[in-house]
């Protein structure tokens, strides 16, 4: 019985995920990836996890480290987008990360 409930829950979560995040190349060795999940209580968290995991794997496959430049939330459709670069572990940008100076949303 427990197993059936778990399988149904996982199927519901899988059905909510609209697309697999894909890396987009921007300018100057900068990349972006978005995670999207249908509206739910945890939709933005799932979208964020998907996007950051994809970015982390992308950089790790190159033997580099993820350096997050900017992130953006779109709560209406539960979309999380992160702009990033892949840097060497000794790069000063990894040692001193950039912080968002302006808010993405004003409440």
Image (cartoon, rainbow, N blue to C red):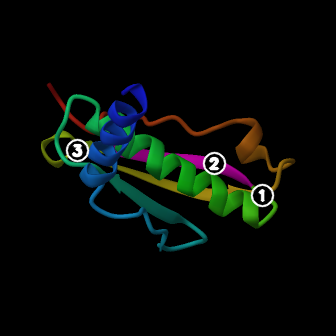
Q: Which mark is residue 64?
A: 1
On screen, residue 64 versus residue 74, left or right, reads right
Q: Main secondary structure of the magenta part?
A: strand
Residue pictured at 83% horizontal, 48% vertical = 89
Q: Residues within 10 Å of mark 3 (few under 14, many from 20)?
A: many
Query: What is the C-alpha distance between the residues marked 3 and 1?
Result: 29 Å
- The answer to whether residue 68 is magenta is yes
Q: Which residues are magenta?
A: 65-72
Q: Can you identify the residue that label 3 sits on? A: 78
Look at the image and tell me whether residue 102 can be seen.
no
Residue 23 % position (x, y): 49, 68
Name the secondary structure under disc 2: strand
Q: Which mark is residue 67?
A: 2
Q: Residues within 10 Å of mark 1 (few under 14, many from 20)?
A: some
Residue 84 % position (x, y): 55, 55
Is residue 38 or residue 34 the one in the foreground?
38
Name the secondary structure under disc 1: loop
On screen, residue 69 versus residue 89, left or right, reads left
Look at the image and tell me whether residue 50 can be seen.
yes
Mark 3 or mark 2: which is in front?
Answer: 3
């Amino acid at each position: 019985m427990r197993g059936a409930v778990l399988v149904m829950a996982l199927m519901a979560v899988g059905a909510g995920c609209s697309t697999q995040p894909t890396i987009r190349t921007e300018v100057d060795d900068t990349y972006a990836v978005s995670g999207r999940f249908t509206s739910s209580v945890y939709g933005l968290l799932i979208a964020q996890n998907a996007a950051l995991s994809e970015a982390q794997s992308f950089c790790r496959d190159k033997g580099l480290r993820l350096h997050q430049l900017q992130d953006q939330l779109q709560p209406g459709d539960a979309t999380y987008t992160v702009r990033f670069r892949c840097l060497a572990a000794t790069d000063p940008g990894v040692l001193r990360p950039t912080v968002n100076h302006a808010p993405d949303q004003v409440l």
